[in-house]
Amino acid sequence: MPAARAQDGPPPAPPAGGEAQDGTPGAGPDAAADDLLRTPAPPAPASPPAGQDGPGPDAPTGPNEIAFETDTLSYDSTGDVVTASGNVVLRSADRSVRADEVTWNRATGQIVGRGNVRFVDEEGNQLYTSRIELTDEFEAGAMEDLLLALREGGRLAAEAGARGDDGTVILSRAAYTACAVEDAAGCPKDPSWRVTADRVVYDPADNRVRFTGAYLEIFGARLLPLPGLAIRTDGRAVSGFLVPDLRVSESNGVEVSGSYYWRVADNKDLTLGAHVFTEAPPMASAQWRHLTGSGAYQITGYATHSSRISDFTGAAISESDPRGYLFANGRFQFDPHWSLTGSLRLASDRTFLRRYDISRDDRLRSTFDVERIDDDSYLSIAGWATQTLRIGVPQGEVPVALPVIDYRRRLADPAGLGGTLEFQLNSLAIMRDEGQDTRRAFAGARWDLKRITGLGQVVTLTGMVRGDVYHSDENALTETAVYRGNPGWETRGIAVAAIDVEWPFVGELLDGTQVFTPRVQFAASPPIRNLDVPNEDSRAIDLEDSNLFALNRFPGYDRVEDGARVTYGFDWELQVPDWRVRTTVGQTYRFDKDPGVFIDGTGLSERVSDFVGRTEVRFRDFLSFTHRFRLDKDNFAVRRNELDASIGSKRTYAEIGYLRLDRDIAEEIEDLQDREELRLATRIAFARYWSIFGAGVFNLTDRQEDPTLTSDGFDPVRTRLGIAYEDDCLELGVTWRRDYTDAGDARRGDTFQFYFALRNLGFR
């Protein structure tokens, strides 16, 4: 692409004595920079004697002022032409022109800049050319061999250009790219992609560039016509067609999808999409986005009319049914305190999202939450509904929580004792079409006081009281007895007192700093009527490092630990240059002989708990390692072993994740059964812009661990492999993915996807 480049630097210092290079006194750049010349053109010096360069007559005045700098200024009285040469700079408002030479023909009013011309408009766009004509309004006119560098990125080059009567710039035989045309060493390089066009119209008034006869070229090959292509020079989006996506899958065959983007206004847009398949009826999609004065929301939908396949037999159960998916979410901030957040997700059936590769979620949650937050209080009024996509789970057994109300108020040192007092009011209503209904309300207060002793111990005192009221019915429909509670009305009181002591020791190690912090917590509570009330929110319980020192190891409110227990452990941290290591280890001892409320396999069901811990290692941004574990207290068998590690840079890296659960929790108690799983992902960059990548999820569980499985100890669940090219302006690649399980009409098999993205054109 042709490109004329400007010398953008400060003008050279004037010759000694402040004289211009042609010998005219007082015409040096320092003197000329102080002169404000009037439009329509730079002024000519006063007329000198015949045959002598010098100041010409006074310039005509106009409404706009132009600041003028030059090394040399001369006047031809015969042709009535003023010539400025050598680092000429013209400035008017937010526009400027720099050139090797500028001439003003006083008779015709024509202003012409020549040689390394750079014109900068008020938006920051820079125009480079070898020759430019300026209008009386200090706007670019006719140009030759020009390059337009847009402020938001991208370059537009053309062989010739001219200004139309309406102020637009019309370019002939032009090319546009967002790629750099020079490498890091300043050497020219060919752009990865460009758009060539017979005619381009640049309208400075609405900051838009429109192309006629445009084609997309990638690596020099002309690939795709782009009718109606338009871009904005200020970086804002414009309406137009997006580049199609291509995918090949086992369920749908070949898929070609395209979209049209409609910029309705600066704060709202609509994207309409069409998906055509060789093995399925077509599908339509749409997305509406709107930014309002108080918030933003979006609505996305998919719709088609296709047959469905049985989740169990794999046979077609309908010739054609309406199928689709709706997703909407948003957040609104009405004032500094009140806000509304909402989300809606609905699918026509359980396999639609997987069949069309939209999502792999096994449940869809819809919720709203009205919140009020200030410095010392919090109010939330929320609701939750869930659509299950799990095969074999009846939708009627899935609860709806409406309303969920939570109010908290915090008071600092209310009785002069120090610390913080927090009051809480909470209510919950859970309803099922085919199952137990539960309603709960409670009121409570919690006091926390933290002090540091003279020896450096951090002592925290906590006291909590709470009163609960429950009502439930149809309890017998809950299969797990320990979750039912008693039908009808039930009440209970809760009181907990605790003291927590941390004692950090700081010292030097390996040219760094280490901190060793032993920690002991004692908590006590009178017996609590846990099994008399339903358990809706405290079913997934497992001792781990994150809840080791929690007053209540249950995740919700329906179950609360009672009795007396002491928890002990330590934190250790080492920081040396570029390295950081952190470790946490702990255990709990209960004074009660039979905890009762904890089931076997949680690590808390006996007087002495299992050991839990976590270790983190980090080296700069290159290495990250996290290991979590739970060891059986009797024989140190690993009940939970979890590893997450990554190594490498952003372009070349490897990630590994490993999880093994050996807890022997009954299936009717918890859905998450014992499993062993391996996750791998890697990306290897090569040849500067290319990379290969892959990922996989593997089930390592064998029949010895779970007799119900047919796995041989190494079953792939999902694998992916691809190759990609990515530079400063172009991204393209192909991905292969294989799924190893069927789910209704989401068939196992291979999926291939081809994609590319162009910087500054919004193509993906």
Image (cartoon, rainbow, N blue to C red):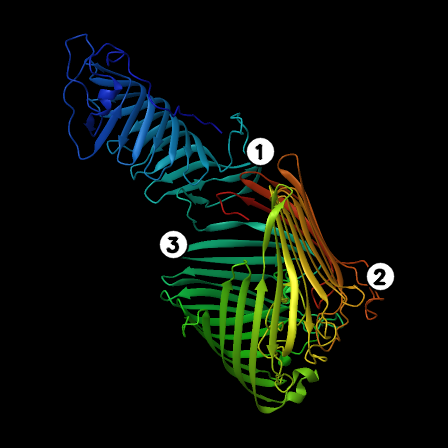
Q: Point out the frontmost of discs 3 and 1.
A: 3
Q: Seen from this angle, which residue lies furthest front?
A: 454
617 lies above or below 567 = above
Secondary structure beneath label 2: loop
Residue 619 in the image: state x and y as whole percent: 63, 44
Q: Which residue is mark 3?
A: 266
Instruction: Identify residue type, mark 3.
Output: Asp
Q: How far across and down, in percent of the image, does residue 116 sit? A: 38, 23
> Residue 657: horizontal and vertical position, in percent?
70, 55
609 relative to 486 in the view: left or right = right
Separation of residues labelled 3 and 1 (CA atoms): 35 Å
Instruction: Name the residue carrying label 1.
Output: 220
Secondary structure under the numbered disc 3 in the rendered image: loop
Q: Residue at x 60, y 73 (%)?
A: 523
Find the distance from the CA under tag 1 to the CA under tag 2.
Answer: 51 Å
Q: Nearer the viewer, residue 307 or 122?
A: 122
Mark nearer the N terminus (3 vs 1): 1
Q: Residue at x 23, y 30 (%)?
A: 66
Q: Nearer the viewer, residue 10 or 312?
A: 10
Residue 208: percent from left, percent from top: 39, 43
- The residue at which mark 2 appears reads as 712
Dot 1 falls on a residue whose secondary structure is loop
Which amino acid type is marked by label 2? Asp
Pointers 3 and 1 in contact (CB under 8 A)? no
What residue do we see at 44% from left, 44% from top? 230
Q: Residues within 10 Å of mark 2 (few under 14, many from 20)?
A: few
